[in-house]
Image (cartoon, rainbow, N blue to C red):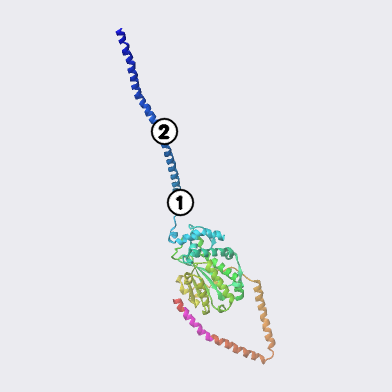
Amino acid sequence: MSADQNVPAPVALVPEKREETVEAVDKPVETPVIAAENTEQTVAKDEPASAPVEEVAAKDATTTIATTEPEAAEPEKPKVEKPAYLSKTPALGELFNRLPTILGNIGHTEMWGVTLKDSDDIPTVNVLIKFLRANEGNVGAAEAQLSKALQWRKDVNPLALAESAKYSAAKFGGLGYLTTYEENGRPLVFTWNIYGAVKDISATFANTDEFVQWRAALMELAVQDLKMKDATEVIDYDGEDPYQMIQVHDYMNVKFFRMDPSVRAATKKVIEVFATAYPELLSEKFFVNVPAIMGWMFTAMKLILSRNTTRKFHPITNGANLAREFSPSIAGQIPKFYGGKGPELKENARFIPLIEDKEQGTKDKGKSAEEPTVAEPIKEDAPPKEETPKAEAAKEPQVEAAKEPTKEEVPKAESPKDESAKDGAQ
């Protein structure tokens, strides 16, 4: 019995130990479960942590995109980067900034045959440089002048005047010429205004607008010879300008300019229009055979034009000294009448197309018909033989009287020549 009793005792103990063992074994097994829970917690904790990472990534992507946008524009920097002529002259860049508004307000884009565009277009740059130089770098003044010039071209259309307009030969025949000489492979353009060729003051100058348009047509032909629209190099703002011409105004025998109001009005109008519409297109302007009474005109010009323009004016008393003002190569091409060796203007110069007026032809015929009519009354009065010698005697003193002042005036004419010679030497 005692033996039977001892048997179950160890049996009972064994399972208890096993349970403890199992429990002991289970405990370490539970440890990974805890680790799993911790892992889940870690994952759970990591999940919300991962969300900010995605948000940061999104923000970084957004920032990258935002940063990329300006970076994408960086390849365009060569276009945005200012050319040397804009960097050198900031006022020119400012004028270009205003150009779209100017063109939009006026509704006209053509200037001297050049279609105004942007700062990458060289002919456009040269046009704006001229307007800026004429106003001594004042952007506001240059803008105002450019606007007025564009408006005038829109209203008048001087290109059409130069290409197709025809003017009265009686009014403008022999008054204006254009010559282009070559020097060092470059054209040197001359415009010649021969005011002494005026046949009828009232006919030529009475219509001021017509006279201005005729002058503008001649000017447009000269500008075309400058070939500004074909320019491939930008003008040096502070340097030489190759796109300029020379003007010669001949006032020989123009004594009537002192008093006639129509001449003054036309001259004043031309000065005003040309100062606005054609700035910086003249390299030199010569006034030849100028009488002293023309001083008022030079005074008027100085009041209207800039100093850069008026310093180019050269009055010369004797037109034969004009050729002295140029190099031998150019002097050899200038007409002989002006001291050169070239042909006269009527022989090889260009001019605005002219038409013969029917009315003028009728007047000329009328005058030729009147001449014998004037002679007939003289023949009718001739029968009294005694009166004829009296008339002849009366005429002879008048002729002599007319000749005497002429003789006295000859030495007086020599003194201006001497003065003009000095002017030419200077």
Main SS category, magenta section:
helix
Q: Secondary structure at mark 1?
A: helix
Report how far apart the C-alphas of labels 1 and 2 lie in the structure: 49 Å
Residue displayed at 32% across by 13% down:
11
Q: Earlier in the sequence, mark 1 or mark 2?
A: 2
Q: From this viewpoint, is residue 138 visible?
A: yes
Q: Is residue 389 above or below residue 189?
A: below
Q: Secondary structure at mark 2?
A: helix
Q: Amino acid at mark 2?
A: Ala
Q: Is residue 162 magenta?
A: no
Residue displayed at 61% across by 75% down:
202
Residue 88 place in picture, x, y as percent: 43, 61
Q: Residues within 10 Å of mark 2 (few under 14, many from 20)?
A: few
The foreground one among 289 and 81 is 81
Give the magenta part as a residue range. Answer: 407-420
The foreground one among 412 and 400 is 412
Question: Which quadrant: the N terminus?
Answer: top left
Kindly identify which residue carries mark 1. Answer: 76
Kindly identify which residue carries mark 2. Answer: 44
